[in-house]
Amino acid sequence: MTHPRRRAAAEAIAAKDPRGRVRVVTDPDPSGPPTALRTANPSWSCVGADATHHVVFQDDVLIAEDFFPCVEKVAAAVPDEAVAFYEGWEGRNSGVVRLGALTGAQWAYAIDEHVPSLALMLPADAARGYERFAAEHGNGWPYDVVIQRYLKALDIPVRIAVPSTVDHDDVPSIAGNSTHGWRRATFFTDRAAFSPDDNTACAAFSLVPFYQYGESKCAVRQEDRWEYLDTDRYLRRIGLLGTCEEGLAAADRPDLPDTVCRQVWLTAFATGVAVAALTDRDPEPAVAAAVMESLGPGGLCEEYTGAELVPMIPLVRDLALAALDAGRAAHRATAGTPRPAPAPGVVVTGGDPAFGAQLARLLTDAGRTAVHAERLDQAAHAVPGAPDAVIHLGSPHDTGYPLADLLADAEKLGARRLVHASSAAVYRGGAAEDRVEDRAEDSLRERPEDAEARLWWDAEEQCRAWGRQTGTPVQIVRFAEPVGPHAPLDGVLADWMLRAWTRRPMTLVEGRRHQIVDYRDMADALAALLARPAGPEICNVASAGYDETAFAELVTETARRTPWERADAPGPHTPLMSTALITAETGWRPAAPVHNGARAQAQWLACDTHDDLVGLWRTPDPGDDTGVRRA
């Protein structure tokens, strides 16, 4: 697939097939907005009548010698799977390739992310069905996200070649991806080889450290979904953060920024821990060096130019190799050491189950051992009797677990405290709507006039009345718009991110201000309240505030660059809150990097929502410009 301006390059790639089977497909609307999605449809549709498989290349690739005979053998050996012959050093799946290479695997299954589609092979029937799916569900989303959604709908796994037999050529992206910086394979070989007798086993990892956007992350499998968390948080969970930091302090530091050294060390140390859990064998030295040479460029390619990255590569590689060894040694030293989990004292319920489970893990990280339960049923697994606290994630809409039932169940369970997570939306409307100062907790003394605000107020009142009746301490925590994975879709940031991903302009309202709370700050604020006897009845919690333009820029920086347009205010908007009270009472202050949390939300919306949000991908109904059905 190519653009007419690069047809010559595409024809050179096609000529590499000794049997002449590669067809060049050009963009059907070359003057239109740059997108690979438009050219993908005819590229996947031109499947030969007698073909068993179909491969689509993008036009900016380098192909290993003997690639085409190798592909024929791979197709015969794994006929029912998608096969990616390239994975870039900048993605989550770069960590998959790195683990595969270090453990001697020839193939590894992709984790949830946009599908590496630079050189992708599908079974022929799947290839023929792509165009119809894209027409019904594409809706402006990036091509590699749409094909990920398609393959998940068909339950077709994606196996990644280790090493890659296709690499990215360093030419400007016509599809608009040049802003992602220098892009190459995590681990590339210039000679493809595969024998029918070779092992077709495909590794599936449950822990995948990776370095992306300058941040060290770990993908951790949690039952039926992936959790993506900062690597230092993961290492703290398994009791190895102290060892990791001691190793970094003792290491020979290269002439690199401190933050780069720390993030590289965390990634490679956690990779060593993961490798040691999988095999006792030492990695091949040349392979280890090769995959660590790609670590720095992959994590930093959006911040540094290629010319700036080249001299950094050996410095990052050597530091990463030392961290890899340290991580392997740390795992060996602690393997088999029991780590008893303390009994949970906090139960999280209400709201979205995935968000609630995530919050429970974060509370546990903060020292308040918690579990998530969709209902307060002591017969359910892990729900403790007489918990120290129940945290209920409130909602103004029917969630299938009425608040009255929750309160009755909390009383039966013997809960010692109830914390009701409410919303800053309770301050909407009212005579003080245009006040400049941020809202304090005591600024709202009577039932608000705004319809949405009344729903939140009524739920708060119901909780307070229950507390007076039962003698149970009740605290109301009014959160700003939550930001992070699994955050509700009814916020402005989520709406704008979905617009950005689907190439629709954001609508900005003059004079409006926004306030958000990072999902990790939510947990830390709740943990700070629970660490003390029940104090103020109401507390406000927020991480950061923005004016309208700065909020739009946050979206373009963390999701996708998109235009915006101006409009008049459609109605009451949630005002900003003061958080002085919770700081005075507990010492809590927002500490999470909100840019990091916003990017996590954007990535979740693009790559991880397929199993959670029914209708998120639908084509808009006539007269509906949102393209989103709220879950």
Image: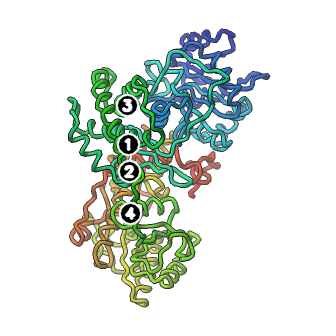
Q: Is residue 597 visible?
A: no
- Identity of the amino acid at label 4? Thr
* Direction from residue 147 to residue 212 in the image, left or right: left
Residue contact at pointers 3 and 2, CB within 8 angstroms: no
- Identity of the amino acid at label 2? Tyr
- Identity of the amino acid at label 1? Ala
Residue neighbourhood size for the residue with mark 4, other residues' Cα within 10 Å, grouped as few (<14), some (14–19), many (≥20): many
* Direction from residue 549 to residue 26 in the image, left or right: right
In this rendering, is residue 557 above or below 370?
above
Location of mark 1 (residue):
270
Location of mark 2 (residue):
234
Residue contact at pointers 2 and 1, CB within 8 angstroms: yes
Color theme of the render:
rainbow
Residue 211 % position (x, y): 38, 37
Q: Residue at x 36, y 69 (%)?
A: 478
Residue neighbourhood size for the residue with mark 1, other residues' Cα within 10 Å, grouped as few (<14), some (14–19), many (≥20): many
In this rendering, is residue 359 above or below 6?
below
Residue 548 % position (x, y): 35, 50
Determine the CA span between mark 3 and mark 1.
13 Å
Snapshot quadrant of residue 139: top right
Q: Nearer the viewer, mark 4 or mark 1?
A: 1
Location of mark 4 (residue):
364
Determine the CA span between mark 4 and mark 2.
12 Å
Dot placed on the residue nearer the N-terminal end, 4 or 3: 3
Residue neighbourhood size for the residue with mark 3, other residues' Cα within 10 Å, grouped as few (<14), some (14–19), many (≥20): many
Q: Is residue 217 visible?
A: yes
* Direction from residue 450 to residue 31 in the image, left or right: right
Dot placed on the residue nearer the N-terminal end, 4 or 1: 1
Element carrying mark 3: helix
Q: Residue at x 54, y 69 (%)?
A: 381
Location of mark 3 (residue):
295
Residue 309 % position (x, y): 31, 24
